Image (cartoon, grey):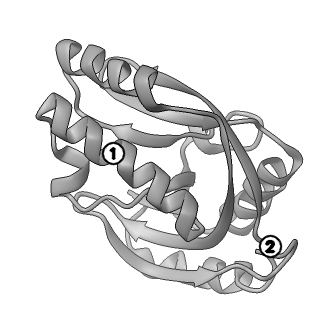
Amino acid sequence: MYLISAYFDQRTTKTFQKYIDRIARETGNAFMTQNHVPPHMTISSIEARNVEVLVPAMDVLQGKIACGPVQFVSVGQLLPYVCYATPVFNRYLQELSAGVYAAVQDIPETSVSRFYQPMSWLPHVTLGKTLDQEQMRMAFRVLQESFFPFEGRVTELGLAKVNPHEDVVRFEMKDGTAC
């Protein structure tokens, strides 16, 4: 499996990293920090035999996808073991999702996860993963005490291998609205 993910400006990345670090410290679950998973928002999850078939799609996206604003307003959970921050699903995210999907949907011998297709996608930034029930409660206590709505900026797009996370291609998006 390979992921195409959005990455953020320095301020947004720093904010998310503080949440990730605090959840790891308070829960004792260091999955995110030990695996060096950077703050990101997955736009597409793709099954492919070889990552090289996806690289041309990333080349097509480079220079066509603009950076843009995202308002993170809430936290949630994907049961049974993930907690995350979620943004408002705005026009920018809708167009980002559609653009990435259009670039990868027709690549032979690949399959885009049904959970990452346009209008079937829950945009989120994972803050804690592989949490058990008690760790999930602790993570939400951390977020209840410290999370506040904020606006961030998506500034980069990347293609990565998973388990462990490894960037294959990562580039800055074109300047759409003063990134």
Q: Foreground residue, 60 or 172?
A: 172
Q: Which quadrant is the C terminus positioned in?
A: bottom right
**Cβ–Cβ below 8 Å for labels 2 and 1?**
no
Q: CA distance from mark 2 to mark 1?
A: 27 Å
Horizontal side of 18 relative to 164 (left or right) equals: right
Query: In the image, what residue occupies the spot 83% across and 42% down?
Result: 90
Nearest to the eye among marks 2 and 1: give it.
1
Hey, which residue is sitting farthest left in the picture?
28
Residue 19 is drawn in which quadrant?
Answer: top left
**Res 89 quadrant in image:** top right
Disc 2 is placed on an element classified as loop
The amino acid marked with disc number 2 is Ala
Name the spot of residue 160 as percent of width and height, x first: 41, 69
Front-most of 63 and 18?
Answer: 18
Q: Give the mark, 2 or 1, whose residue is nearer the N terminus.
A: 1
Closest to the observer: 61 or 143? 143
**Measuring 44% from the left and 20% from the top, which residue is drawn there?**
144
For the residue marked with disc 1, what is the amino acid?
A: Ile
Seen at 63% across and 82% down, the residue is: 172
The numbered disc on residue 111 is none
Label annotation for residue 66: 2
Residue 6 in view of the camera? no
Q: Which residue is mark 1?
A: 20
Instruction: Check the picture and name the quadrant holding the N terminus.
Output: bottom left
Left or right side of 54 for 87: right
